[in-house]
Structures are given as structure tokens and as C-alpha cells.
Amino acid sequence: MNTQTASPVTLSEIVAARARLNGAIVRTPCVESAALSELTGVRIFCKQEHLQRTGSFKERGARNALAQLTTEQARRGVIAASAGNHALGLSWHGRLLGVPVTVVMPRFAPLVKVSRCRQFGANVVLHGDTYDEARREAARLSAEGQLTYIHPFDHPHVIAGQGTMAFEILEQAPDAEVVLVPVGGGGLLAGMSTVLQALKPDLQVIGIEPANAASFAAGLTAGAPVRINTQYTLADGLAVAEAGKQTLAIVKPLAHRLVAVSEESLALAILRLAELEKCIIEGSGAAGLAALLDGKLPELAGKRVVLLLSGGNIDPLAHSRVIERGLAADGRIWRFDVLLNDRPGALAHLAGVLAAAGANVTEIVHNRTFAGPDLSRVHVLCTVETHDRHHIEVVKQRLAENGVELWNGGLGGISS
């Protein structure tokens, strides 16, 4: 396994990477969103990296790294550990360049990413339950097969490739005042910061991490990579237990601000992007909007802000579950428990009260067995569609006025 020493990537290297990538990747649009601007109170420009061939900005770094292999390295092939998007980028561009690609992915990797890597001709190895376990297996296979290891973020050629996006943003949104960058291991932040600091130092760059996997902030605080215990996050592409040594070395002197976002705000951001921008974006790509919805950046009101929609590779089933979670966070789905008298007409009475309150019933579970010691009562778990959180309060009031008793405050699996 090749190791890299911590050394900053230069602007000239990113300029060379841009020339190398010309015609090999999509120059994605960066368009103003009236809907998101109205929602957030800032002028939003969406850099649509989910429109890359493999659905992610990771193509940039993958292509730049593959294009600089020696003839012998290209013949033997490359290997990487990745939860998905880096693997996809390597798989697709490896196929275009005739380079054999092996990707080691954790067993929990989204099925859509696993299947697409195989469709692109990569040898996919599923190993371990975490990225770290996959990385160790990739290191072993790299040494065993003399394959060139291409790190997903802490590799100078990858960092330089990711940084090429900054040139496009400067050309497409020349008046931008802020760029919100999703941060996992830091490859994108490091590459873009190098360009923006050199060419437009007054443009503010803010990194966005999931609160459940804030390894980059921990590394900046410590001055070196720090291993943290990550928790599950919808932004699975940012779920890195330890930031990169090189990425930290590049970003640390630039004094960037980092913001951590909640899982609820990530779900809500994915929902808003689907509803308002008509695009399917994974949790990582929704991180910038999540920060605005989370109320973490009030000082940006009225400013021109670029959101990096960095990827759209989310499993359809997972996306539907996230949308439901977003609807719940938005107060548009409410699940509640009630105790009813076990007699004819009680359930009809409940349905009538909900209908009068304007709540649409989507599911009712009627249970006698677990309704407690009072055999005259029955437990009902009900899920309804509502307009917003205020509407939920109206429905609660109507239930109370009509003698319907909420059990445990009416809190269920999807609650207000």
C-alpha cells in the first residue's frame, strides 16, 4: 500500500488537473434556485455535481489519479476502499482508461452503488461492517497483488482533482460570497480551499459535517487526525472516523469554519431538494442545505451562497424512508397512540374526529392484547397526514375536545 507524506497540494497542480479532466467529466451547472432562496432567506446557487456520470463529484479525483498512473501501474490495476462514490468514480473511469479496478466496500454499502460498480466492470469485494475494516482489507490486497492504492480523500492527485470544481464555481457564480462544502475526510474541502484562497480569498468557505461523524473538526482541534466513534448518519458518504493527514495540513492554516448538522435537518434537506428542486440528493449532498435549515448560519441572510449538491447516489428504498422521516420532521406525518372504549362505533368516532380536523388517516393498528389491564379498553396506533406542526396541535385539541385520550402524550414512532 502506497503511503503519502503530508504536503500541500499547489494551485498549479490543480490547474494541471483541470486540463487533464477537460472533456473527461461533466462541467456541471451552477444555477440559482428561487425556491430554495425563498425558503432560506439567502440567494442559493446549486452546483449540481449529482449530474456527473456516476452521480458524484468523486469522479474528479478518481480520474485525475488514474490519468497519472505509470504504464506498469495501469497494467497491474488499482484498488481502493470506499463506501460508494469514490468506488464508482474509479470503476467508471478505470473502464474508460482500460485500468483494472478493485474496490473494497463495507457490507453495509448502498446496494445501488455496489451494483453500479459491478456494471462498470470493477471487481467488488464486500468486506467488514465499517469503512476501516474495508480499508485494512484493501491494504492487504494491494500488497498481495501489487495494486496501486488510491485513497478516497487523503491522496494528492485526488485532492487536486476535487479542487477543479472551484474553478467552475468562480466562473459560473462570480459574485458568490459563500460556499458550503460537505466534509468527510476533507479531500473536497482541501482542494477547493487551495483554489479559492489563492484566487478569491474574500469568498468564505464553510465546511459542513454530520454531528454524528464530525471527525474533521476533531482533527482540526487536535492539529492531527483523531479517531472518533461515529454514529449512523444519513450522510453516509461523510461518515469517516478519522480525517486525512494531508487534508488537515492543507485546511488548518486557512482558518475555515466548520458546522455540524443534525440527522433531522439532513432528512428535511433531502425532502426539500426533492420537492423544490425536483432532484434526488443523498445525505452528503444535502449537508449544506441542512445547515441552513438547522438555523446554524443566520449571518448568511441575504448573501449569495453556493450549495454543493455533491452526490445523488441514494438507494430508492432508503430515499423513501428518508422522505418519510423528513415529512415527520416537517410535521406532515404524525403517529399517535390512543386508548378507546372497546365497543362498536369507537373506531368510527375516532375516524370522524380526524376527518373533521382535516387529518388524513394512512394507517390504523387496532390492538386489544397490549392495551393494559382494563379489558374494556383497546389500544389504537394511528398514523395521519397533516399540513404542518400547527395542524398537529389542532388535531390534538380536537381529539381532547371529543374525549379521545392520547396514550403517553400521543408519541409514536413518527411523532411531532
Image (tube, rainbow, N blue to C red):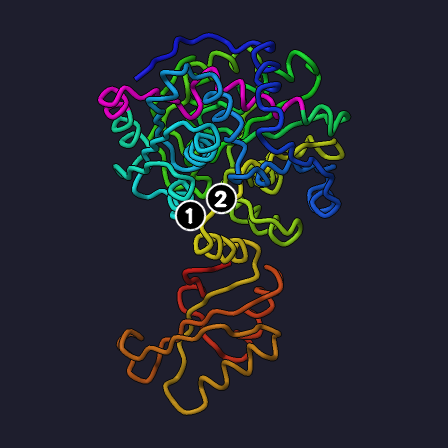
Q: Is residue 309 left or right of residue 124?
A: right
Give the residue at mark 2. 313
Question: Magenta: predominant secondary structure element?
Answer: helix
Q: Quadrant of residue 371?
A: bottom left
Give the residue at mark 1. 112
Viewer-proximal residue among 257 and 142:
142
Could you say where residue 92 lies in the image, as x and y percent from the top left? 46, 35
> In what element is the residue under mark 1?
helix
**Disc 1: CA contacts within 10 A as few (<14), some (14-19) or many (>=20):** few
Q: Which residues are magenta?
A: 139-167
Q: Residue at position x 36%, y 16% from top?
A: 72
Amino acid residing under circle 1: Val
Q: Residue at position x 69%, y 32% from top?
A: 305
Q: Quadrant of residue 27?
A: top right
Q: Residue at position x 44%, y 56% from top?
A: 317
Viewer-proximal residue among 403 and 362:
362
Is residue 321 part of the magenta span, yes or no? no
Q: Residue at position x 33%, y 77% from top?
A: 367
The mark nearer the N terminus, 1 or 2, is: 1
